[in-house]
Amino acid sequence: MIVVVGGGAAGLMAAIAASERGAAVTLVERTADGGRKILISGGGRCNVLPSAIDPHRFVSDSPPHLVRGLLRSWPLDGQRTFFEHDLGIPLALEAETGKLFPVSNRARDVRDRLVGHARRLGATLVFETLVTGVEGAGDVWTVRTSRGDYTARAVILATGGLSVPATGSDGTGLRLSASLGLKVHDTYPALTPLIAEPARHAALAGVSAHARVRARADGRSVDARGGLLFTHRGYSGPAILDVSHAAVRSLRAGKDAALRVQWSEMDARSWEQAIAASNGLVTSVVARVLPQRLAAALVAESHMPLDRRASELRRRERVALIERLTAYALPVTGDEGYKKAEVTGGGIALDEIDPRTLECPARAGLFLCGELLDAFGPIGGHNFAWAWATGRAAGIGAALRNS
């Protein structure tokens, strides 16, 4: 028998893949119904997949070729075929974002079809059960739970990380892996909103702009484009979430978060031309491109009166304004933590597992997948693609060992 610990995206896919290959599978999940992150993803719509995937945008402290190999183990075309044909969930492309959602726009359809498919294939799903320990090696494993012990020939850990603990993610798999002697890279909140104390931009809460945000972490540059939303405590939106890990890691290392924002597609040269061609108020020139409240705030921060006309700008004023429009130093002092983080950074080092089967060579019979592993991608379905691919690989690997 195979025991899958965790009934989220990766765990359900692992149970399905193993059951399809004739293995007897028992999935143990702490919540009442499983797939809680699936239910809340995409605002309740579930961004099942991205329309394209770039392994280079994934973040990991493990060797990059291992990330690439795991993502390529189940290409997007195969994943989409599974959801549309095997599960009967037609997907629709949201062209402006490149995201694939169920046509029904119901995340519950995705979760329920995965659960139903696992059951139809013969998997036993045990809900509202805590796993308290995992022991063994080779073909003899014991999974200790709040409802008694299970004996298995293989165990798949798919417990997720620490993000959104309200969905059941409490770090159980990380603790179990550490207790078994596996290498765990330091964890941190990723794809999380950022905060600034004092909240210098609280008056802009609710304002959003399409921005380019740049950051540096561990000597590497990170660049993201998309929506940036001001909140009462700081900043959110796709562009912020996609670079948040760089800010989190820098702050934890005692360094400046060092975020720079270009507030539109216009670069310094474009702004120079726009200002030179106008005789209107500077605020009006900027507000043609940016939201009015943001435009006024940036002009005010450039230390000029709001009634200053573009033709009246002094050189130092123009330089200061353009710098704020194209390379704004965004003040960041912290993050919203795991409570609002979409994923967990860090985790089980990828060189602890066989990249073909996801079995741990040091603990034969133990397989790992999903968010528990040290890799995450940008928003937009990339982390589901990782969960589906690694869950499937672990399920197939465990079934082969179990046969």
Image (tube, helix red, strand yellow):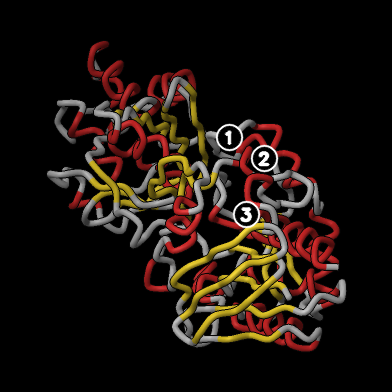
Horizontal placement of 235 versus 2: left or right?
left
The residue that label 3 is drawn on is: 97
Whether residue 85 appears in this view of the structure is no
Residue 164 occupies quadrant:
bottom left
In the rendered structure, which disc, 3 or 1, sits on the residue that comes first in sequence? 1
Point 76% across, 41% down: residue = 69
Image coordinates of residue 236 in percent, x first then y, are 37, 52
Q: For the residues marked 2 and 1, what is the alpha-carbon distance in whole angstroms?
A: 8 Å
Q: Are marks 2 and 1 in contact (CB under 8 Å)?
A: yes
**Helix, strand or loop status at disc 3:** loop
The residue that label 1 is drawn on is: 62
Residues packed near mark 2 inside 10 Å, few (<14), some (14 to 19) or many (20 plus): many
Image quarter (top left, top right, bottom left or bottom right) of the C terminus: bottom right
Residues packed near mark 1 inside 10 Å, few (<14), some (14 to 19) or many (20 plus): some
Image coordinates of residue 72 in percent, x first then y, are 79, 45
In the displayed structure, would residue 241 be above or below residue 92? above
Point 48% across, 87% down: residue = 147
Q: Amino acid at mark 3?
A: Thr
Q: For the residues marked 3 and 2, what is the alpha-carbon distance in whole angstroms?
A: 24 Å
Q: For the residues marked 3 and 1, what is the alpha-carbon distance in whole angstroms?
A: 29 Å
Image coordinates of residue 77 in percent, x first then y, are 84, 57
Q: Nearer the viewer, mark 3 or mark 2?
A: 2
Q: Amino acid at mark 2?
A: Val
In the rendered structure, which disc, 2 or 1, sits on the residue that comes first in sequence? 1
Image coordinates of residue 194 in percent, x first then y, are 31, 47
